[in-house]
């Protein structure tokens, strides 16, 4: 036998709300009934008190009480007053309790049923008592002879309203109250139904246990995914972000609820996150990372926000840079092999022509030139990665008609660079700067790229690359390190942005100035001891 599925969360809330509304309406009704009944009794008591006092002080009543036959004069008066005052009875009696008036004529002359002691003592009092007409709220007041000395008591007045009359009045009020309560219950039930119907649509008919389980799965998946996940609401605020997203964007735990525009992210990345249209595999840079951004708006009749995924491509970009360098080295080796073959054919041809001395001189000159550059690089730069990079870039530059020169002040001993400064970062920084310098110097007079690489007393590493190109427009000095800036074809402009990011990650600084030869000069300073606070300086001298 299959157990019934638990009621949905919306259904449970609907039942709870209906019961709650019914309980509130019932409680209010009971309270109103008790309050109305108490108020009705108090009103009846005040009404009877006013009537009794008015009758007791009436000159006509006092005069009739002094006469020998008070009933004939007082009965018509009390009946008329009873109807006008809205009380059940007005009984005037002698001090011994003999009735002079009563709504029922047969009761006249009989003894009054109730207490009279306080009134005979001269005090007006009230009580609830069962009389001829039933249980009633009554007030008894003394009638004093105003002409006698001391104002002796010559009669008593009792005015009252029966509990039955009070109950009838309360029943009328309760009937109206029940009508209002029924309307309130119906309106509350309708409102509850509408609200829960909407809730049912939003919760897709799931019950509390299912929603709790889904939340647990959601939290587990959110923190398990290594890629960054970012959700923005319709007001472009961060509604949700996982651990990977915080790490990739460098955001703190207080990011949720804050607008993206206030997050101090790079301008292009902020524009991509806030873009109304989808973005697919866009590469953007943060202060320390290369991220690939994909975004898609969430809409359902109106814009509800944006879902953004972030992938870390920092390592991949570095590996791509290394692969490009390796490809460049391979092409340079192929070119050198082709050039060496041409030179070898030339040497062989000179020997065949009987010009052995000229063949030896030609081959020796080429070997001396290549060996001189190698000896200079190896002698000055003991760090093998930098030495290999400089030799490879020198060969590439030579193929493009540009001389790559190592400054005489260059000096880096092997083992001096700390482990906190990876060789991969040096390849990224120096490789991109040299590539840009070669591109700028190519075709210029005396095309040359000068590289300086030295350490300053073991505290910082200085890398400087200068070219003989046309230089950089001073107006573009502030934008030169931004992603997408390039003087070459579109789709490039990532190299200097990566250089700045790598320098920032290493706690160093990069500066742009004019080269002595008229071109551009980039200077990078990286700390070798304690890692300083990241600082990036972009100036143009």
Image (tube, rainbow, N blue to C red):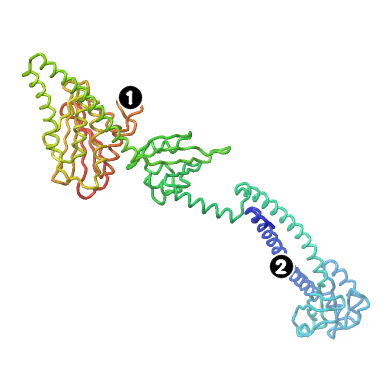
Toward which corner of the image does residue 369 lie, by quadrant? Answer: top left
User: Residue at horizontal 10%, vertical 20%?
Assistant: 362
Q: Position of residue 157 (x, y in %)?
A: 82, 78
Q: Earlier in the sequence, mark 1 or mark 2?
A: 2
Residue located 87% across and 78% down the image: 132
The residue positioned 38% from the left and 41% from the top of the image is 312
Please name the residue shown 15% across and 46% down the image: 458
Quarter of the image where the C terminus is located: top left
Of circles 1 and 2, which is in front?
1
Place of residue 538 in the rendered image (x, y in percent of width and height, measured from the top left)? 25, 36
Q: Please name whichever residue, 502 or 110, is drawn nearer the observer in this view of the structure.
A: 502
Q: Where, by quadrant of the figure, is residue 397 drawn?
A: top left
Position of residue 517 relative to residue 164, above or below, is above
Q: Is residue 209 left or right of residue 187?
A: left
Is residue 92 left or right of 483 when viewed as pictured? right
Picture layout, residue 49 above or below residue 235: below
Picture coordinates of residue 370, whole percent (x, y): 13, 28
Q: Which residue is mark 2?
A: 35
Could you say whether the residue bearing mark 1 is in a helix, strand or loop? Answer: loop
Question: Which mark, residue 343?
Answer: none
Work out whether 163 lies above or below 526.
Answer: below
Q: Nearer the viewer, residue 317 or 252?
A: 317
Q: Residue furthest left?
A: 357
| Total numbered circles | 2
What label sits on residue 489 in the rendered view?
1
**Label 2 SS:** helix
Classify 10 Å Cα crowding around label 2: few (below 14), some (14-19), many (20 and above).
few
**Pointer 1: residues within 10 angstroms few (<14), some, or many (20+)?**
few
Tell me how far mark 1 sits from mark 2, CA to CA: 88 Å
Of residues 77 and 421, the one drawn nearer to the viewer in this rendering: 421
When asked about the image quadrant of residue 189, the answer is: bottom right
């Amino acid at each position: 036998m299959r157990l019934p599925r638990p009621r949905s969360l919306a259904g449970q809330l609907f039942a709870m709300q209906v019961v709650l509304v019914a309980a509130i309406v019932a409680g209010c009704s009971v309270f109103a009934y008790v309050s109305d009944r108490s108020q009705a009794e108090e009103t009846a008591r005040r009404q009877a008190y006013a009537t009794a006092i008015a009758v007791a002080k009436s000159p006509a009543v006092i005069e009739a009480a002094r006469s020998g036959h008070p009933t004939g004069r007082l009965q018509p008066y009390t009946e008329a007053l009873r109807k006008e005052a809205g009380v059940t009875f007005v009984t005037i009696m002698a001090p011994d309790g003999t009735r002079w008036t009563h709504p029922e004529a047969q009761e006249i002359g009989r003894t009054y049923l109730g207490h009279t002691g306080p009134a005979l003592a001269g005090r007006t009092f009230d009580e609830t008592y069962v009389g001829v007409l039933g249980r009633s709220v009554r007030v008894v007041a003394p009638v004093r002879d105003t002409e006698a000395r001391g104002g002796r008591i010559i009669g008593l007045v009792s005015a009252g309203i029966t509990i039955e009359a009070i109950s009838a009045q309360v029943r009328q009020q309760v009937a109206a109250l029940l009508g209002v309560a029924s309307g309130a219950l119906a309106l509350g039930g309708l409102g509850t139904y509408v609200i829960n119907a909407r809730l049912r649509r939003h919760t897709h008919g799931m019950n509390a246990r299912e929603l709790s389980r889904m939340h647990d799965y959601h939290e587990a998946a959110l923190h398990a995914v290594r890629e960054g996940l970012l959700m923005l609401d319709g007001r472009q605020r961060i509604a949700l972000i996982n651990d990977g997203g915080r790490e990739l964007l460098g955001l703190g735990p207080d990011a949720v609820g804050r607008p993206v525009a206030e997050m101090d992210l790079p301008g292009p990345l902020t524009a991509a996150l806030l873009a109304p249209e989808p973005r697919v595999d866009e590469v953007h840079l943060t202060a320390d990372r290369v991220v690939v951004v994909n975004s898609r708006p969430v809409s359902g009749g109106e814009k509800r926000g944006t879902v953004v995924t972030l992938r870390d491509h920092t390592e991949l970009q570095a590996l791509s840079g290394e692969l490009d360098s390796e490809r460049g080295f391979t092409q340079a080796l192929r070119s050198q092999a082709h050039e060496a073959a041409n030179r070898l054919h030339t040497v062989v041809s000179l020997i065949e022509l009987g010009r052995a001395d000229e063949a030896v001189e030609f081959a020796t000159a080429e070997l001396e030139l290549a060996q001189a550059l190698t000896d200079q690089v190896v002698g000055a730069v003991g760090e093998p990665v930098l030495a290999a990079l400089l030799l490879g870039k020198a060969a590439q530059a030579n193929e493009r008609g540009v001389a790559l020169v190592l400054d005489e002040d260059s000096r880096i001993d092997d083992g001096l660079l700390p482990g906190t400064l990876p060789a991969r970062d040096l390849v990224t920084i120096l490789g991109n700067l040299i590539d840009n310098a070669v591109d700028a110097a190519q075709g210029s007079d005396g095309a040359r790229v000068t590289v300086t690489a030295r350490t300053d007393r073991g505290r910082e590493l200085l890398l400087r690359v200068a070219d003989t190109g046309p230089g950089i427009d001073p107006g573009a000095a502030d934008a030169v390190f931004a992603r997408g800036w390039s003087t070459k074809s579109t789709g490039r402009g990532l190299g200097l942005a990566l250089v700045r990011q790598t320098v920032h990650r290493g706690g160093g600084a990069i500066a742009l100035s004019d080269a002595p030869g008229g071109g551009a000069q980039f200077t990078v300073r990286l700390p070798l001891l304690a890692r300083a606070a990241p600082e990036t300086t972009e100036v143009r001298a």
